Every structure is written in C-alpha cells, then in structure tokens.
C-alpha cells in the first residue's frame, strides 16, 4: 500500500524514523513531506529515506494520506479518491466535513473514534495523548504556582506540601495524580466511576466519595451524564476540597457532549490568591465556569489555564506515541494490500 505522511500545522508528526522502518519492513511504499517532523526533533536526514517529497508529490504518490490533525488537510479537492487517516475531533461541524468527503469520493477514518476496547487499545490516540497532557498539566501548575510542591524543612523553617485536587480520574487524571505525588504533593481525586477508586488509591491519593453516581460499562471508560441530584451533591463535596486546594486539575469530559461545570465562579472566588486551576476539558466548554480555551485567566488572584492540547508541548514523545498508534491502526486495517471490510467494528466506528 502507498502511504503518504503530510506535514501538520502543529508540532507533532504522524510518522517517526522508527515507525517508518516498520512500514518498510511490512512492504509498504512510504512518502513523507519535507520537514514534516522538524518541530518534533526529527530532521529529514534522520529518516534516512529517499522519498522525502513536496506536499503535492506526496499526495500524488499515495493511496492513503495520514496527518495528526484534520485541520492540516487544506483543500479536500486535492485529495479526490484518497483515503485519509487523521484526528477529526476538533472539527466544529462534522456534517460539513462529511459533505466534502462524499463530494470528493474520499474514504476517511477518524482516529479519535477508536473504541476503548482491548483489541483497539494500541491504536487509541486519545489515551496516548491524555497521559502526556495529565503529566504536563502538573508541570504547568508548578510553573504558575508561587509555592513548591514538596514538604521542605530548612534551618529557616519548614514549608508545607501543596494540596492538589484532580477532578476526573481517567488516563489524564491518573497521570496527573502520579506526577503530583512524585513532586511531593498531597493529592485528592474525584470521579463518578466506582472503578476509578482503586486506581486513585493505588497511586497514593485520597478518593473523594460522592454517592449516587450513574455508570454505564458500555461507555468505553468514559464518564456519562449524571443526574441533577448527583451533580448537586458532587458540587457540594468537591467544592469543599477545591476551596482548600493550591492546585486543581480538571479532566472531566463526557464523550460527545459539553463538559460538565464542576467549579463555579463563586467557588473560584473562595480559593486562596495564588491558587491555580488547569482545565484540560477547555476545548469542550471546560469544567470551570471561568475557563477560556487556550488562555490564562486571572480571576481574583486565581490563575485558570484552559488547554486541552498540552500533549503538543511534548511533541517528540507525543509524535512517538501517535505514530505507533497510527502504525497499529494501519497494520490492522490493511490485509493483502487492501483495506479490510468496513463492517469490522473498529473501522465502522472510525469511518466518517
């Protein structure tokens, strides 16, 4: 199969020198756009490949076009009859994209729709990126907070460890917990899924109990919409912890829906000045009422950073993980140099 990897308008790249070798070993023909991996630390020379071409030549020489984000596609008219593999999750209007795909006879697979099943685990880009975002959220908080994380005892006196509250104990939340613990913080976490309790406790954090949560095992590890009664109870319990916290990291998202508001304006105003909120759910509305996506807001002395794309700031490792996810997906969908029947559960889930 002829594969083409294009340069994205962001820091990550969808193929690395390591995954390139895997494709070649699997007898695929591979073209890469010039300088595709430069920002991630992968120079054209590091690929040691003779098909580093212009964007136009990559498109003309490929059956399958791969990008990190669909926003980097450009004109769909240039991709008539091609297969596109990318992350379409940031598209504001999927119906418009679908019409462009149909008009140009394009087959498109959205990597953000990979189901969270055992067989698809190695293809799951959202989990890969979420882990990096959770780590980076804590590092960002440490930079913004006018305190150090660990307890420190010196001749000049002692310093108490900071208190960190993590809302949402999925992949990002668990990595945030682990990172904050490594830095010496006291960590508490909340999640409506009972299965998250043991994971939180295993990392040495305290689990914030809120009874009455709804669960759905078919939700693929995502939280689901909760009742008004539960949300009210959760807000009351969590708010007490948030007010006392130095750092709050929010990761709560409901698949296909707007993120729930967990921290209201009045709660922010009760927090100590200098406290920090890192909202990883900002791209879908945010978990804090005051969050503004991709901005830092200073409200009453509390800094609120809204950023769902922190993984892009770790572009080298993010590219390594993303490219492995893509390789595993392509390796799964291609058989005898053809794409398998889209009645397959994973393909059916991803096809736009």
Image (cartoon, helix red, strand yellow):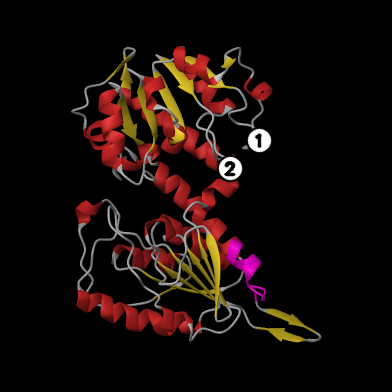
Label 1 to label 2, Cα distance in Å? 8 Å
Going 41% across and 62% down the picture, which residue do you hit?
251
Going 63% across and 37% down the picture, which residue do you hit?
39
Q: Residue 32 occupies which quadrant of the picture? A: top right
Q: Which mark is residue 315?
A: 2
Residue 21 higher or lower than 197, as above or below: above
Quarter in which the C terminus is drawn? top left
Going 64% across and 83% down the picture, which residue do you hit?
160
Give the mark nearest the N terminus, 1 or 2: 1
Confirm whether the magenta stretch covers residue 144: yes
Nearer to us in this view, 345 or 9: 9
Confirm whether the magenta stretch covers residue 261: no
Nearer to us in this view, 106 or 139: 106
Q: Is residue 221 visible?
A: yes
Position of 214 with respect to 300 (left or right) is left
Q: Is residue 27 visible?
A: no
Nearer to us in this view, 25 or 36: 36
* Secondary element type, mark 2: helix
Instruction: Judge the density around disc 1: few (<14), some (14-19), many (≥20) Cα neighbours within 10 Å.
Output: some
Q: Position of residue 266 (x, y in %)?
A: 42, 84
CB of mark 1 within 8 Å of CB of mark 2?
A: yes
Q: Position of residue 282 (x, y in %)?
A: 43, 60
Q: Position of residue 85 (x, y in %)?
A: 38, 29
Q: Which residue is mark 1?
A: 41
- Span highlighted in magenta in the image: 140-150
């Amino acid at each position: 199969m002829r594969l083409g990897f294009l340069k994205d308008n962001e820091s990550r790249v969808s193929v690395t020198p390591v995954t390139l070798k895997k494709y070649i070993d699997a007898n695929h023909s591979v073209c890469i756009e010039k300088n595709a991996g430069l920002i991630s630390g992968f120079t054209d020379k590091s690929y040691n490949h003779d098909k580093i071409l212009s964007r136009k030549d990559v498109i003309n020489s490929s059956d399958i076009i791969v990008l990190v984000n669909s926003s980097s596609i450009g004109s769909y008219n240039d991709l008539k009859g091609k297969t596109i593999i990318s992350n379409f999750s940031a598209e504001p209007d999927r119906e418009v994209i679908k019409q462009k795909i149909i008009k140009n006879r394009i087959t498109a697979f959205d990597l953000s729709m990979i189901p969270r099943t055992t067989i698809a685990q190695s293809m799951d880009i959202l989990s890969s990126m979420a882990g990096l975002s959770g780590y980076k959220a804590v590092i960002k908080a440490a930079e913004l907070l006018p305190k150090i994380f660990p307890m420190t005892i010196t001749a000049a006196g002692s310093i108490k460890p900071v208190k960190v509250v993590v809302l949402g104990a999925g992949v990002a939340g668990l990595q945030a917990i682990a990172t904050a613990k490594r830095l010496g913080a006291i960590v508490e976490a909340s999640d409506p899924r009972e299965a998250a309790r043991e994971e939180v406790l295993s990392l040495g954090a305290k689990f914030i109990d809120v009874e009455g949560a709804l669960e759905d095992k078919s939700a693929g590890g995502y939280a689901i919409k909760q009742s008004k009664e539960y949300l009210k109870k959760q807000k009351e319990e969590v708010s007490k912890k948030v007010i006392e916290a130095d750092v709050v990291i929010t990761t709560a998202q409901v698949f296909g829906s707007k993120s729930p508001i967990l921290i209201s304006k009045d709660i922010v105003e009760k927090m100590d000045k200098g406290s920090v909120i890192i909202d990883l759910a900002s791209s879908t509305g945010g978990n804090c009422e005051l969050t503004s996506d991709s901005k830092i807001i200073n409200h009453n002395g509390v800094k609120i950073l809204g950023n769902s794309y922190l993984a892009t700031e770790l572009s080298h490792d993010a590219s390594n993980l993303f490219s492995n996810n893509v390789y595993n997906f392509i390796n799964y969908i291609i058989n005898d140099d053809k794409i398998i029947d889209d009645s397959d559960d994973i393909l059916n889930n991803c096809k736009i």
